[in-house]
């Protein structure tokens, strides 16, 4: 047996590299016309290989795109949320987009109507607790165990007063009319008109819920 | 990148460049153009399956890599067809033969030249295994897969190639000491 020897192995490696060059000079070709069967077989092999390479290529590109997108989104969100003005603008934009997709809910249990107005959406567990006319203004109040909301409907010719002292005011541009949102402590009020009536909707419930009610108000 | 392009893949370029060379190697062994065509196809299947690294298309290293695979696949087919070993100038195996340690061998251009000449005189099947180990850096397991021979056969060929080389070095007086 030949014992392991680093020097010998090194010499064999060097000699092998030289041998490759000598062997190379001995290689000869033979020009032939390959058969059609062989050509088809080779073409199938190449097509298969090309598909594999394409799949690898696509997966590499997809990974790169995913990384770039991830970085873009991360950086964008970081920037938007780090600047207060941008954050407010962005969130308002999202809300407007979301609001435009609110669906009408025709469930009888969650609706209410009187002579002047139809509320096609009333949040779960809220029931009418009071309805009265004060001058030209119809006031309807809804309650559940702890929360309430109230809608005041008056003709557009009439006057309406809303307390805006120490309030945050925001305006949402709607399809038919603009809605003014006034937030004061726990109370949020929405004010708008539709050409026939003016509406004030207020309560201590979430703004989103009030907006959903507002978008589902129809006049009679 | 060949994404959605009609560019030739590396394997197609290799085929176009070496198909006639590989055909001749296979045909010289098998004496059949049809079988030689099959071996050419098989050679490229081996390159793809084993993900062999082709650094430079037009080089002695690449040419010999393909030639060696082609030759060994041809020999396998020949053996299966004839039910006997292809004549490859087998080195007669001498049982229990032991050689003097080669610890004192000097690394010199002269010795490299002697070993290279000795490698050139080795039968193809031994030389191919040695070159795949030393030039291309494949493991015995890789060689077993690529040449479609058992790992024992690879070990045997590798060992006997070294024995032959050591014997030559002894004969040339490069290694001092008596053979045991």
Image: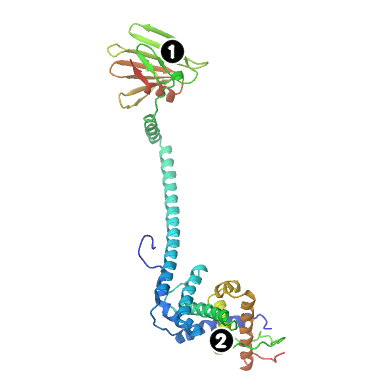
Q: Could you tell me which quadrant the N terminus of chain B lies in?
A: bottom left
Q: In what element is the residue under mark 1?
A: strand
Q: In what element is the residue under mark 2?
A: helix
Question: What is the basis of the colouring in this image?
Answer: rainbow
Q: Residue at x 37, y 7 (%)?
A: A133
Where A43 falls versus A152 (above or below)?
below
Q: Nearer the viewer, residue A57 or B32?
A: B32
Where A118 falls versus B71 (above or below)?
above
Residue density around tag 2, few if under 14, some if 14–19, many if 20 or more, within 10 Å: many
Number of on-image labels: 2
Q: Which numbered tag is attached to residue B119?
A: 2
Q: Give the quadrant of residue A122.
A: top left
Residue B140 at x, y percent in the picture: 60, 74
Q: Could you tell me which quadrant the C terminus of chain B lies in?
A: bottom right
Q: Is residue B174 left or right of residue B53?
A: right
Q: Which numbered tag is attached to residue A199?
A: none
Q: Give the quadrant of residue A104.
A: top left
Can residue B105 be spotted in the picture? no
Q: Residue furthest bottom?
A: B172
Q: Residue at x 39, y 34 (%)?
A: A94
Q: Which residue is mark 1?
A: A141
Chain bearing tag 2 is B
């Amino acid at each position: 047996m030949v014992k392991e020897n680093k020097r010998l192995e090194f010499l064999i490696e060097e000699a092998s590299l030289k041998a490759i060059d000598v062997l190379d000079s001995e290689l000869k070709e033979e020009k032939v016309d390959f058969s059609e069967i062989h050509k088809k077989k080779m073409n199938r092999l190449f097509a298969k290989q090309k598909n594999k390479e394409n799949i690898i290529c696509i997966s590499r590109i997809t990974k790169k795109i995913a990384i770039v997108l991830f970085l873009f989104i991360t950086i964008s969100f970081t920037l938007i949320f780090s600047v207060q003005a941008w954050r407010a603008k962005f969130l308002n934009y999202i809300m407007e987009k979301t609001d435009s997709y609110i669906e009408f809910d025709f469930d009888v249990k969650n609706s209410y109507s009187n002579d002047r107005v139809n509320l096609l959406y009333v949040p779960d567990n809220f029931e009418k607790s009071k309805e009265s006319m004060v001058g030209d203004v119809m006031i309807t109040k809804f309650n559940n165990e702890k929360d309430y909301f109230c809608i005041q409907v008056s003709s557009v010719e009439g006057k309406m007063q809303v307390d805006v002292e120490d309030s945050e005011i925001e305006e949402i541009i709607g399809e038919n009319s603009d809605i003014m949102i006034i937030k004061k402590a726990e109370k949020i009020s929405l004010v708008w008109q539709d050409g026939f009536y003016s509406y004030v909707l207020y309560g201590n419930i979430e703004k989103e819920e009030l907006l959903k009610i507002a978008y589902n108000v129809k006049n009679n | 990148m060949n994404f959605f392009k009609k560019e030739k893949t590396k394997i197609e370029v290799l085929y176009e460049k070496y198909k006639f060379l590989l055909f001749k190697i296979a045909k010289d062994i098998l004496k059949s153009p049809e079988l030689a065509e099959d071996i050419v196809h098989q050679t490229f299947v081996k390159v793809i399956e084993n993900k062999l690294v082709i650094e430079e298309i037009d080089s002695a290293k690449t040419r010999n890599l393909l030639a060696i695979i082609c030759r060994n696949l041809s020999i396998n087919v020949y053996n299966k067809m004839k039910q006997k070993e292809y004549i490859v100038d087998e080195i007669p195996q001498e049982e229990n033969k032991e050689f003097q340690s080669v610890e004192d061998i000097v690394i010199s251009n002269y010795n490299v030249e002697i070993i290279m000449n000795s490698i050139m005189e080795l039968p193809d099947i031994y030389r191919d295994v040695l070159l795949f180990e030393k030039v291309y850096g494949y493991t015995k397991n890789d060689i077993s897969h690529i040449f479609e021979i058992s790992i024992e056969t690879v070990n045997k060929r590798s060992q006997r190639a070294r024995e032959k080389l050591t014997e030559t070095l002894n004969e040339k007086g490069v290694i001092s000491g008596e053979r045991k």
